[in-house]
Amino acid sequence: MISTISRRYSLDEYRAIEKKAEGRSEYRDGEIVPIPGRTLKHSRIGGNILTYFTSVMRDTQFEPINSDLRLWIPEYRRGVYPDVMVFDGEPQLNAERLDEVLNPVLIVEVLSPSTADYDRLSKFRMYRSIASFSEYLLVEQDEPFVERYSKQSQGWLLSEFSSLELSIPLDSVSIELPMAEIYRGVVFE
């Protein structure tokens, strides 16, 4: 058996590396994990959602942000890049950092084959440790299908949407997101 030594990085080391890196990586309590590249469909879907949110949330207290901003999850010592986050009011920065936030109310992840299980299970568990977090969308890119998890007093309620004629009610931001807007310009094979 061959043993491998994996280097652990301090949070400051990770932040310095990430600032200069061409690609992005997540910080997982000492480990630096590269984020895989995205497909055209993935980027188009994320862009569609952000564009729609930006349009309908203009002149409200809600602010949608793209995947360039890192979400810091203190309880798990994780820094991750959700595809889209929405904030109710001003995003709360992690200390004085301008590249890390703490308080989204809504998080959207566009699923990829390599990350779908992580997004559904481990990442969702970590997101639930964020006090402000109350709604989660998991968006398939190869078919029109969205899972919506909404925080209830007894736990999280799952609703599924699989038709382009449907709209997804988003209680955390008081709007509906049409499935047709999510998948605008996306060709399914």
Image (cartoon, grey):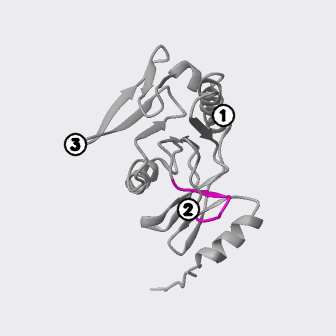
User: Does residue 70 show up magenta in the picture?
Assistant: no
Nearest to viewer (mark 3 / mark 2): 3
Picture coordinates of residue 37, whole percent (x, y):
66, 50
Magenta-drawn segment:
95-102
Q: Going 49% across and 86% down the picture, which residue do you hit? A: 3
User: Please, what is the three-letter code of the amino acid marked with disc 3?
Assistant: Gln
User: What is the chief secondary structure element of the magenta stretch?
Assistant: loop
Vertical relation: 142 (above or below) 179: below
The image quadrant of residue 163 is top left
Q: Going 50% across and 51% down the picture, which residue do you hit? A: 103
Q: Going 48% across and 31% down the picture, which residue do you hit? A: 173
User: Please, what is the three-letter code of the amino acid marked with disc 1?
Assistant: Gly
User: Does residue 97 show up magenta in the picture?
Assistant: yes
- Camera-side residue of 188 and 32: 32
- Tell me if mark 1 has few (under 14), some (14-19) or many (20+) residues whose alpha carbon lies within 10 angstroms of its own: some
The residue singled out by tag 2 in the image is: 79
The residue singled out by tag 3 in the image is: 154
